Image (tube, helix red, strand yellow):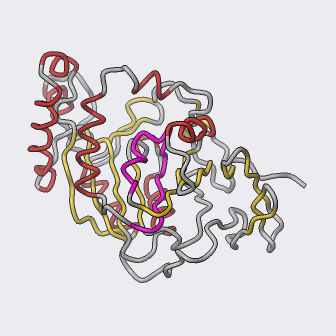
Amino acid sequence: MDDQTLNESTPNEPTRPLCDYEGSGYRQEFWEGQGRDYEDLTERVAMRRLLPPRGRRAVHLGAGFGRMTNELSGYDQVIVLDYSRTMLREAQQFLDASERYIFVAADVYYLPLADGSCDTAVMERVIHHLADVPAALRQIRAVLAPGSPFVLEYASKRNLKAILRYWLKRQSWDPFDHAPVEFVKLNFDFHPAYMAQCLSEAGFLTERRLAVSYFRLGLLKRVVPLAWLVALDRLLQPTGEIAPFSPSVFTLNFATGDMPPHALDGPLFKCLRCGELLHHENDMVVCDACGARWAIRDGIYDFKDELGD
């Protein structure tokens, strides 16, 4: 995810810069055959430790081509949401043809999901591309029913490699400073204390935190058997409860309070223009209140662009 297109259009104001993987070869260029089996397996270990095994309706935010979506196999319905239509088409091919999956192209800053319509949310390898973390977390909290779990992964700036580089004066930014650091355009690392504050202010209570991918070094991955690295990482992940110094941190958070009310049995989508609930009409979803419409194309609910008159 290094050569993504920046797209600054959103359904509402204010606009925020977004990473758009439309037309990218992310699956082939970053994952498949690219020496990242260690990262994939350790992330699955963490996900299985944190994610409740069953539920009614989960949303996988920034799902990409669906690499981790199969970890939600115990859920009755899974919303596979990404900003890129290209990624969603690949996810349709990558996942089984089950009707459990609902594919949605949408902006995480303006989620078209009805308030309280999901009982689980998952987001990994996404938030490090977001310039406005608090705004995104508020959106995620709004779609979750009270008490719902939210598994979030973020890139930590307070990792061992960054600390060593800072002490050796090979990088200018301080890994112990709480402010996010943007080391490449729309690529951020976050301090664990900053993320804890953002989650709390958005209405989440963090219950668990795992330190993941300690051995993300090319030399180690080449000379140490994969099974050994994964086993060692599994042993070290619980150190995240005290002080994670890994490049990746997984957290289990729960939606606090009693709002919005549980809405798992109601309509799934809401209008991005006025917030009213949408209904299906042929190959569209339509708002009766303001007349806004969005297309359903090849099995994908497309909220990237509103249909004109």
Q: Quadrant of residue 34?
A: top left
Furthest residue toward right: 309
Above/below status of 224 relative to 8:
above
Q: Residue at x 15, y 21 (%)?
A: 220
> Residue 122: x and y, percent?
40, 55
Residue 44 lies within the magenta run: no
Q: How many marks?
A: 0
Tell me if 161 is positioned left or right of 195 in this view: left
Image quarter for residue 68? top left
Q: Is residue 116 left or right of residue 291?
A: left
Q: Quadrant of the C terminus?
A: bottom right
Region in magenta: 55-73
- Residue sitting at x 26%, y 37%: 41
Give the residue displayed 27% in from the left and 55% down from the top: 251
Give residue 230's position: percent from left, percent from top: 16, 35
Give coordinates of residue 232: x percent, y percent. Answer: 9, 37
Q: Position of residue 149 (x, y in %)?
A: 35, 66
Who is closer to the viewer here, 162 or 102?
102
Q: Is residue 203 above or below residue 307?
A: below
Left or right side of 174 for 12: right
Nearest to the observer: residue 241 or residue 12: 241
Relative to 262, is 157 above or below?
Answer: above
User: In the image, is residue 134 above or below residue 177?
Assistant: below
Residue 147 relative to residue 90: left or right: left
Q: Residue at x 16, y 42 (%)?
A: 245
